[in-house]
Amino acid sequence: DIQMTQSPSSVSASVGDRVTITCRANQGINRYLAWYQQKPGKAPKLLIYDASSLQSGVPSRFSGSGSGTDFTLTINSLQPEDFATYYCQQANNFPWTFGQGTRVEIK
Amino acid sequence: QVQLVQSGAEVKKPGASVKVSCKPSGYAFTGYHIHWVRQAPGQGLEWMGWSNPNSGSAKSAQRFQGRVTMTTDTSIRTAFMELSGLRYDDTAIYFCARGPLLVGAFDFWGQGTLITVSS
């Protein structure tokens, strides 16, 4: 199975900050990488697919980049509603796998 | 609008089976896979497998093979995930999610179904 490693595991940030989350695969996954946001008690929400494509309805302050094994999710100008846990997920190799999550907390 | 509505929470004893339903609406049921993802309390997301309403085929992660059955019924536009031989560590929220027939991300999710395994 492909292992997805996110860093950091948690980050404290203030409203207006830029936050960067990294996701690394232990083997190449082309660009089949998605990012999700999950709030407590809710289902995950798709933010980014195919490494850098913004899902419809997602604010443009979210962006994704990378290919192969290294990927990044950037949140520009963090908003109060962005405090949540973020997961990356690969869909290149069966079985699909998720990163362990990154919690974005209020500083 | 696209929605996936799941069945309600259940409490099961160890060794029992549970069957969770997922009823999508707002799109062509046979045009997408239905994936199943679970989340143990306080833990991350774990992909379990998918079912294809168009072909009736399904594929599960190896760790669940032999215990999980994923099916679809096109007559009632509903997907099902049945997990047998329940253990305490199967306690989790089980989500269904829509995914493309080819590889890709899960763009719509059900609200989740809490399955508690308790004696």
Image: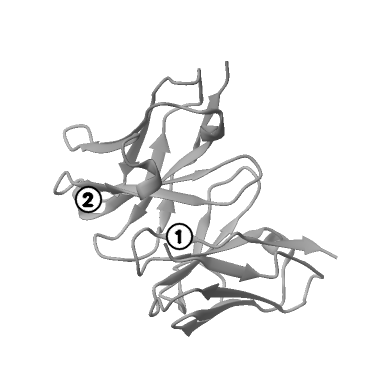
In terms of depth relative to the viewer, which is nearer, A41 or A11?
Answer: A11
Q: Is residue B65 above or below residue A1?
A: above
The residue shown at (46%, 68%) is A34
Q: Is residue B43 left or right of residue A32?
A: right
The residue shown at (25%, 37%) is B71
Q: Quadrant of the C terminus of chain B?
A: top right
Give the secondary structure at mark 2.
loop
Q: Label 1 vs label 2: CA separation?
A: 26 Å
Give the quarter of the image for residue A8: bottom right
Q: Is residue B102 left or right of residue A1?
A: left
Name which residue type carries label 2: Ala
**Subunit bearing disc 2:** B
Residue A42 seen anywhere in this rendered image of the structure:
yes
User: Could you tell me residue A92's position as x and y percent?
Assistant: 35, 70
Q: Is residue B40 above or below residue A20?
A: above
Q: Is residue B83 above or below residue A103?
A: above
Q: Is residue B64 above or below residue A6?
A: above
Q: Which dot, 1 or 2, sits closer to the camera? A: 1
Q: Which residue is mark 2?
A: B28
The answer to whether marks 1 and 2 sit on the same chain is no
Name which residue type carries label 1: Thr
Q: How is the image coloured?
A: one colour
User: Could you tell me residue A87's position as x and y percent?
Assistant: 56, 62
| Label disc, if present, on residue B17 of the rendered structure | none
Q: Callout 2: 10 Å neighbours few (<14), some, many (20+)?
A: few
Q: Which residue is mark 1?
A: A97
